[in-house]
Image (cartoon, rainbow, N blue to C red):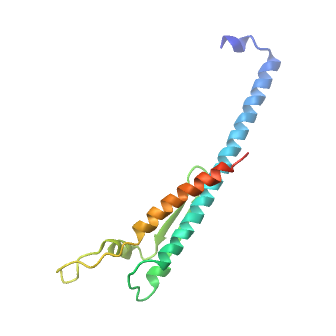
Amino acid sequence: MKGLALMSSKQLKGLNQLTKEVNKTLMQYSRNCSEEVYKAAEEVAQATVDTLKTTGNYEDRTGKYRKGFAVKKQNHYTYPSATVHNKVYRLTHLLENGHMKANGKGRTKAFPHWKPAEEKAVKEFEDKVKDKLKDVGV
């Protein structure tokens, strides 16, 4: 603090201006990074939906389950996200893990399709974010 007292008012104004410019630049960089992360999340989520619609060796008699995959996008400044979900949400857990049969004797076969898609999406998202943030400038 002793050093600030020795500065002239002209030097303090220059320091304040520099502080404002640095803050402005950092805010712009933060905004750019947030936008790029959101774009990566959207791209990966849509690719995951496409994968889920075409994979899985279960029988979809009506087609509603495969058509039910969708992306829910939320673009918050601090936390952008894209969530993959199925509109027939009650069936996803039962297909993924199997369940007790109606007569109580035995279990149905599990059809894991979410777990492989999730693992692939996580890896793809990490790679896309790294690539996109390399190119982010102010």
Where does residue 70 sit, x and y in percent of width and height? 52, 72
Q: Residue furthest right?
A: 10
Near-viewer residue (14 or 39): 39
Q: Give 103 or 125, whichever is nearer the viewer.
A: 125
**Residue 50: where, in percent of width, then height?**
53, 74
Seen in the picture, residue 131 relative to 107 is either above or below; the reply is above
Look at the image and tell me in which quarter the N terminus lies.
top right
Q: Is residue 68 visible?
A: no
| Placement of 14 over or under 120, stated as above or below | above
Image side of residue 111 versus residue 67, left or right: left
Q: Which quadrant would residue 65 be assigned to in this image?
A: bottom left
From the viewer's side, name the closer residue of 3 and 119. Answer: 119
Residue 46 in sight here: yes
Residue drawn where x is 78% and y is 29% of the image: 17
Determine the residue positioned at 51% across, 69% down. Answer: 48
Q: Does 85 sit above or below residue 133?
A: below
Determine the image quadrant of residue 98: bottom left
Name the residue at the left extreme: 105
Number of numbered labels in the structure image: 0
The quadrant of the rendering that contains the C terminus is: top right
Rendered location of residue 67, percent (x, y): 50, 81
Horizontal arrangement in the rendering, residue 90 relative to residue 81 (left or right): left
Asked if residue 86 is positioned above or below residue 64 in the image, the reply reads above
Q: Nearer the viewer, residue 119 or 104?
A: 119
At 26% from the left and 79% from the top, the residue drawn is 108
